[in-house]
Image (spheres, helix red, strand yellow):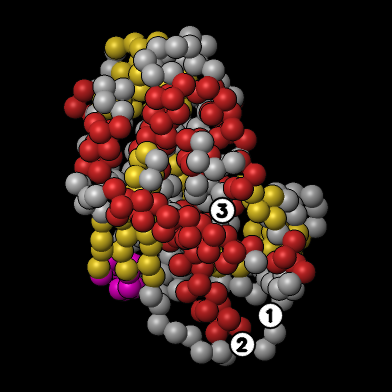
């Protein structure tokens, strides 16, 4: 049976968050991160509506559009990504994002951050305020530190990087620490919660970071705040505690069976908030929705994820797992991670694998 599929998306071009760090480090031109929706309409018959979804009427089963009008649905899938928790870093707000960028939603913010890094005075200080768990792309902030270090080593070798991190430990920590010691010795200082990183505020006018009473003057400050599900999940009333709880077998909302929530916005269990995870969840969800609407066969859910990170030229690492649904959550059933001390050929192969993945997933998404 045929299904009418409508995609509501405000942007004409999607700039991937994944690989935006590679643009930052000079490994990818910005244009290569941009993808359009034309093929989805022309080749796949999807009704693409370029507008912002401004509300969901669950009783009437309609989605309101910011530009006026509404779109009816039998099944609604929302994948709104993240929004930031206002006030999670005192002194920072969205109004300050042009001064202290978050650069955590892709696009122009990443361009701004790179321009700021390139304009740093010689011997200057780059600071990052890393986010608390849970957040989008667990290794993302640390790959970003690596890419900024790569940029500074070439353009500003006496510069310093200050990583202010409220977490005790982080994704691929041993691999990043090994890589930083090898490629960027003496450049990166991480301040964890034991040294005051759980009590941080910023002053955007003075360009300072206050770490538990110690004030650091910085030249660039990348503030990555605490996160929650994108706004439309809230407006639809399918969130609890900031995220949208879903059923592990099919990604349907635990609050409304006719709504599914994919990717970063969902609270599903063990899967990290990554583009790979969202794509894996989307396939399970689409299979379930098609089955519900047409009676077609629904296959048992299996999920997977891999997160690659680049530490320096041809020095790629990865972490990943396979997952299956239980009654309570999506649970990890097997996992793998790169090892410290790997040889250069393996690290290069891992990086090249990530390039193949990017080409594959973007073709999968945009045709």
Per the rendered image, the range of residues in magenta is 323-333
Pointer 3 residue:
80
Placement of 359 over or under 109, stated as above or below: below
Residue 312 occupies quadrant: top left
Q: How many marks?
A: 3
- Earlier sequence position, callout 3 versus callout 1: 1
Residue located 41% across and 31% down the image: 150
Q: Few, some or many C-alpha atoms within 10 Å of disc 3 (few <14, some 14-19, many ≥20)?
A: some
Give the farthest residue toward the front. 345
Judged from the image, the secondary structure of the residue bearing numbered disc 1 is: loop
Pointer 2 residue:
294
Question: Which of the two residues, 284 or 295, is positioned nearer the viewer here?
Answer: 284
- Earlier sequence position, callout 2 versus callout 3: 3
Q: Where residue 154 appears, x then y in whole percent?
A: 44, 25
Q: Where residue 257 appears, x then y in whole percent?
A: 51, 72
Question: Going by the image, does 359 lie left or right of 152?
Answer: right
Question: Which of the two residues, 66 or 307, is positioned nearer the viewer here?
Answer: 307
């Amino acid at each position: 049976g045929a299904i009418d599929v409508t995609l509501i998306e405000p942007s004409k071009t999607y700039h991937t968050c994944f690989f935006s760090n590679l643009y930052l480090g000079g490994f990818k031109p910005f244009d290569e991160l941009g993808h359009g929706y034309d093929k989805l309409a022309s080749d796949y018959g999807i009704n693409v509506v370029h507008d912002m979804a401004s509300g969901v009427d669950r009783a009437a089963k309609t989605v309101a559009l910011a530009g006026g009008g509404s779109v009816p649905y039998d099944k609604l899938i929302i994948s709104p990504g993240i929004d930031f928790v206002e006030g999670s870093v005192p002194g920072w707000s969205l109004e300050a994002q042009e001064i202290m960028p978050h650069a955590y939603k892709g696009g122009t913010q990443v361009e701004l951050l790179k321009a700021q890094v390139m304009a740093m005075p010689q011997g200057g200080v780059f600071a990052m305020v890393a986010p608390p768990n849970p957040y989008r792309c667990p290794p993302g902030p640390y790959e970003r530190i690596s890419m900024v270090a790569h940029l500074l080593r070439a353009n500003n070798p006496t510069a310093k990087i200050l990583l202010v991190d409220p977490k005790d430990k982080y994704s691929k920590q041993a691999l990043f620490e090994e890589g930083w010691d090898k490629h960027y010795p003496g450049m990166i200082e991480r301040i964890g919660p034991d040294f005051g990183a759980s009590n941080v505020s910023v002053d955007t006018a003075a360009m300072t970071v206050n770490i538990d009473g110690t004030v650091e003057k910085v030249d660039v400050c990348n503030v990555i705040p605490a996160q929650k599900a994108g706004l439309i999940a809230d407006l639809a009333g399918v969130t609890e505690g900031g995220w949208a709880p879903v059923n592990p077998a099919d990604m349907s909302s635990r609050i409304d069976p006719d709504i599914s929530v994919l990717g970063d916005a969902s609270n599903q269990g063990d899967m990290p908030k990554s583009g790979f995870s969202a794509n894996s969840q989307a396939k399970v969800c689409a299979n379930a929705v098609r089955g519900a609407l047409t009676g077609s066969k629904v296959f048992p859910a299996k999920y997977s994820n891999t997160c690659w990170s680049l530490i320096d030229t041809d020095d790629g690492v990865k972490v990943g797992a396979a997952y299956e649904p239980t009654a309570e959550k999506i649970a990890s059933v097997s996992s793998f991670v790169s090892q410290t001390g790997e040889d250069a050929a393996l690290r290069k192969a891992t990086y090249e694998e990530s390039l193949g993945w990017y080409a594959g997933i973007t073709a999968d998404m945009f045709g």
